[in-house]
Image (tube, coloured by chain):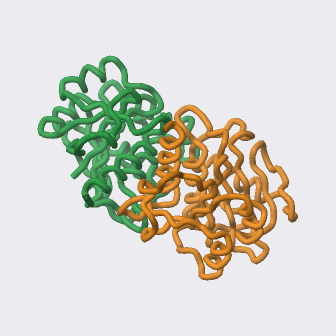
Chain colours: A orange, B green
Amino acid sequence: MVSFIVVSHTATCDPHFSLNDLCGGAGRVDLLARAIQASLCVSHGIRQDVVCYLVFCSDPRGRIIRFSGSDLRRFNPDERSTAALIKKALAIPAGSLFREASPGVSIRVGGLSELLAMEGEKRHVAILDEHGSDIRACDDLCCNLYVLSDHQNFSEQEMQVLAEYEPVYLSLGPTVLHADHAIVLLHNERDRWMHG
Amino acid sequence: MVSFIVVSHTATCDPHFSLNDLCGGAGRVDLLARAIQASLCVSHGIRQDVVCYLVFCSDPRGRIIRFSGSDLRRFNPDERSTAALIKKALAIPAGSLFREASPGVSIRVGGLSELLAMEGEKRHVAILDEHGSDIRACDDLCCNLYVLSDHQNFSEQEMQVLAEYEPVYLSLGPTVLHADHAIVLLHNERDRWMHG
């Protein structure tokens, strides 16, 4: 089981955003949709052993949306239909426990701190950093919780929260990439590692 | 300079497709939009030295749309705006020479055969094949023209056309991926190679 957490600093928590303006009015929900695709989709299938969390920071209470590969049904890899699942999740009343909005998609109130308190304890946490250790030079890939930021860097507060989990800092190569492309590279490294 | 060719067997050549139905009525234009993003986009920028060609086979005359990284202006990485550029290109009258539809985006009539006659001669061609040589085991990455198929395999006729250019068969790892994710891995391998 591997999990990805993608922290969005700009995506709206208001479910009334337009599916025709994911890049603008919705605050870069397009980026989150692509991160979900990269986490979960392979050719003609879904990665069953993956969970991808989206953390929405634009609202003080925060929201966490969870996509679970093993529970998704009729999932298409395009941005619009993925954004529609996000919209549907944001529309249901959210409390402090996850509540299912559609098969495999759940939502709760909270931020990175609450999510890591729930998920980070028994996991090996990694964050991406262009100055980190080259992932190909790592002896093994024991990390199973990867935390990524959107088009903005992690805030100082977020870095402090992450530091409590003693994360590994990983670099994926010489070029700084979008979060979804970084997830593709992480999966490839893990796929190779798991297949010896 | 590196080029990617993505062959679509299903995407419509009719510019009247709906931007709200890229996955369905447009015949998987969503997949082409993501391939463009993966070819051209890095964090906060565009790869200047990349050209991505889309080949549309759904019409007997065929269409080739060219996205040139060095000439694109105001390019967003989301599917909808990329699909809008494809739509705009399909709407202009196309002949046997490339004609610009918007900055960095051109269109002509033709198929894989015509495109390779134009592009393949002096290039080192590679195609992806799960049974091919592992890209990490290759001595160098001299290939500079990568040909990928959409969600369908290359037809027998396409394979015959490709064979004339003596392509290298490359594998990217143990998992079969979408075309856009394959392009991300190809770029990473080339980025690492170029940076020694």
Residue B32: give x, y in percent of width and height: 43, 42
Count of labels in the image: 0
Q: Quadrant of the C terminus of chain B?
A: bottom left
Compare residues A168 and B135 and report the one nearer the observer.
A168
**Residue most extreme to the bottom:** A156
Residue B71: in sight, yes or no? no
Residue B113: give x, y in percent of width and height: 23, 28
Residue drawn at 31 percent across, 30 percent down: B62
Residue drawn at 25 percent across, 57 percent down: B194
Report which quarter residue B137 is drawn in: top left
**Residue most extreme to the front:** A139
Residue B165: give x, y in percent of width and height: 18, 29
For residue B169, side relative to residue A119 (left or right): left
Compare residues B18 and A171 and report the one nearer the observer.
A171
Compare residues B33 and B91 and report the one nearer the observer.
B33
For residue A77, side relative to residue B85 (left or right): right
Residue drawn at 71 percent across, 39 percent down: A70
Residue drawn at 42 percent across, 42 percent down: B182
* B158 over B179 or under it: above or below: above
For residue B135, side relative to residue A106 (left or right): left
* B166 over A128 or under it: above or below: above
**Residue most extreme to the left:** B122
Compare residues A74 and A99 and report the one nearer the observer.
A99
* A56 over B189 or under it: above or below: below
Report which quarter residue A86 is drawn in: bottom right
Residue A51: give x, y in percent of width and height: 68, 49
Residue A47: in sight, yes or no? yes
